Each structure stands twice: as structure tokens, then as C-alpha cells.
Image (cartoon, helix red, strand yellow):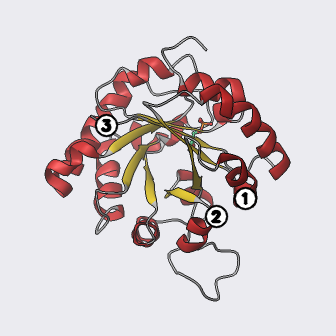
């Protein structure tokens, strides 16, 4: 059985003070959650504040990006070892915003994923088609390319895939549970080609306008193993409701 993951991607939001405030309120609300892994990816500058409050609890920390070198003259970059040192156990790699605005390619995302795994981080590897690609009927081709190129040499152990259709991110247009399942099933079949039986253990998260009122229907689908949540993870109540989907909060 795959343990679900609910991951918050805060993107470029929250100072360290705001991070502390969020975690102080959020932590007790989810303290009894055992059957779902909870992950928060704050900005790099808030990792320390978050780590101080999360030590020993059931909430894990993630970086939002990472560089593929261990150290050196790479102004502005953060290495996998630095993320480990900042108490991260996960890192998001290849997010569509990195691909769209910061020149991330399948190749750089691939190098980052391998370097992160080498440092002992679990990689949340993001893939997903744009609206033009979907409308042109290229969704599966894009997902196939992003998995085969992006995950070449990446181990199944320490890998989580996030399917985030770009047209659903921050737009309020969630993929329907059926659209999500169709894409997740296709991704799983690609993972079977790459990893054989181990593909069954890889969690595939859905991301794109996930909210408390659509999480249960998404989670009812066989190949949806959790969510990567942007906007709705910035508010304590809505992220807690997503984590505790299907229960009264
Ligand atoms: P939204 O939940 O704001 O659509 O963002 C999704 C996302 O990009 C998570 O990584």
C-alpha cells in the first residue's frame, strides 16, 4: 500500500515570522495524523524557522528547488547537502514554474534529481503538460518525454512524482478526478517500463488548484497518491482540511 503524501508548496510566500505563526497553529491540528505523510516546502529563508518548530514531529520539510553541484562558485544556488543540513528530507524538482521562468529543462531537472538522491533526499519530481500541449493532443507524449528524460538514472527508492498540469496551476481549474486518474495511470505505466515492479511503490501526487472541497474526489482515484498544494496550503485551515480529507476537522 502506498502511504499518501500531502505536500505544501508555499512558493515565494511567507517570511520566517509568518512561517512560525503558521506552524504553531497548524502542528496541533494534524498531530494525530499517522496514515498520511505531511510535507511543507517553505522558501529557503524560512527553513530554519520551520525546522526549529517541527523537530521530532510528524511534518517533514522540503526544499522548493536544489542545484546539482555539492559546493562551489554558483552564486545564489543551494546544494543538496545544504538542504539536508537545513533539516529537509524532501526536495521539489522540475516544478513547471522553474521550467517556465527559470530555464529548467528535462536535463537540468534530471541532474538535480540524481544529486538530491545521492545526498539522501527524497525527490518530488514535477511533470505536466501546458494547455497548448493538451489541446494539441500531446499530453501523453509530453508526460512520456518528461519521465523518460527527467528520470533517467533516478532511483525508484526516494522518488515521488507530481503530476501538475500547467493549465490547472493557480487558475482554479482543477483537472477532473477522471482526467487526473487518466494521466496518473499513464505515468504509472511509464514508471513500470522504467522500474518494473518497483513502480507500484512510487507515489504519484496531483497538483493544480487542489482545495479542501476537491481533495476527496481526487484521492478516491486509484493512482492518485496525494497532492502537491500551492495556494490552498498557505492558510492553516485549508491545508489542515486537505491533510485530513474525508474526516471532520
Ligand atoms: P496551486 O495549488 O496554487 O494551483 O499550485 C499548485 C502547484 O504548483 C503546487 O506545486
Q: Which tag, 3 or 1, sits closer to the chain's start?
A: 3
The residue wearing badge 1 is 48
- Residues 213 and 171: in front is 213
Q: In the image, which disc is placed on residue 221?
A: none
x then y, percent, for residue 138: 33, 44
Q: Position of residue 43 (x, y in %)?
A: 70, 55
Drawn side of residue 8 relative to residue 155, left or right: right
Marks 3/2: CA–CA distance: 27 Å
- Ligand 1 falls in which quarter? top right
Q: Residue at x 72, y 59 (%)?
A: 48
Residue 211 visible? no
Q: Quadrant of the N terminus?
A: top left
The C terminus lies in quadrant: top right
- Picture quadrant of residue 114: bottom left
Q: In the picture, residue 226 is in which quadrant?
A: top left
Q: Assess disc 3: are there few (<14), some (14-19) or many (≥20) residues with their C-alpha within 10 Å of its C-alpha.
A: some
Counting other residues with Cα less than 10 Å from the Cα at mark 2, is it few (<14), some (14-19), or many (20 or more)? many
Q: Circles 3 and 1: CB distance less than 8 Å?
A: no
Image quarter for residue 81?
Answer: bottom right
Secondary structure at numbered mark 1: helix
Label 3 close to label 2 by CB (< 8 Å): no
Q: Is residue 172 above or below residue 105?
A: above
* Residue situated furthest front in the rendering: 56
Return the x and y of residue 75 as percentages of the image width and height. Answer: 70, 81
Which residue matches tag 3? 2
As helix, strand or loop, the secondary structure at mark 2 comes to loop
Q: CA distance from mark 1 to mark 2?
A: 6 Å
Q: Which residue is mark 2?
A: 86
Contact (CB < 8 A) between labels 1 and 2? yes
Amino acid at each position: 500500500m502506498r502511504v499518501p503524501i500531502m505536500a505544501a508548496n508555499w512558493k515565494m510566500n511567507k517570511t520566517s515570522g509568518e512561517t512560525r505563526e503558521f506552524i504553531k497553529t497548524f502542528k496541533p491540528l494534524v498531530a494525530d495524523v499517522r496514515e498520511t505523510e505531511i510535507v511543507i516546502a517553505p522558501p529557503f529563508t524560512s527553513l530554519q524557522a520551520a525546522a526549529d518548530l517541527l523537530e521530532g514531529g510528524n511534518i517533514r520539510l522540503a526544499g522548493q528547488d536544489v542545484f546539482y553541484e555539492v559546493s562551489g562558485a554558483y552564486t545564489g544556488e543551494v546544494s543538496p547537502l545544504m538542504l539536508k543540513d537545513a533539516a529537509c528530507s524532501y526536495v521539489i524538482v522540475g516544478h513547471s514554474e522553474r521550467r517556465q521562468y527559470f530555464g529548467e529543462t528535462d536535463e537540468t531537472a534530471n541532474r538535480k534529481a540524481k544529486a538530491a538522491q545521492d545526498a539522501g533526499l527524497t525527490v518530488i519530481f514535477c511533470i505536466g503538460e501546458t494547455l497548448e500541449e493538451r489541446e494539441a493532443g500531446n499530453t501523453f507524449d509530453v508526460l512520456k518525454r518528461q519521465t523518460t528524460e527527467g528520470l533517467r538514472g533516478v532511483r525508484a527508492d526516494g522518488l515521488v512524482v507530481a503530476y501538475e498540469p500547467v493549465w490547472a496551476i493557480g487558475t482554479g481549474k482543477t483537472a477532473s478526478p477522471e482526467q487526473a486518474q487518466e494521466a496518473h495511470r499513464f505515468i504509472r505505466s511509464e514508471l513500470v517500463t522504467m522500474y518494473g515492479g518497483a513502480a507500484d511503490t512510487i507515489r504519484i501526487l496531483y497538483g493544480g488548484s487542489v482545495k479542501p472541497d476537491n481533495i476527496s474526489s481526487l484521492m478516491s482515484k486509484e493512482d492518485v497518491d496525494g497532492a502537491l498544494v500551492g495556494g490552498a496550503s498557505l492558510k492553516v485551515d485549508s491545508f489542515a482540511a486537505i491533510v485530513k480529507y474525508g474526516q471532520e476537522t
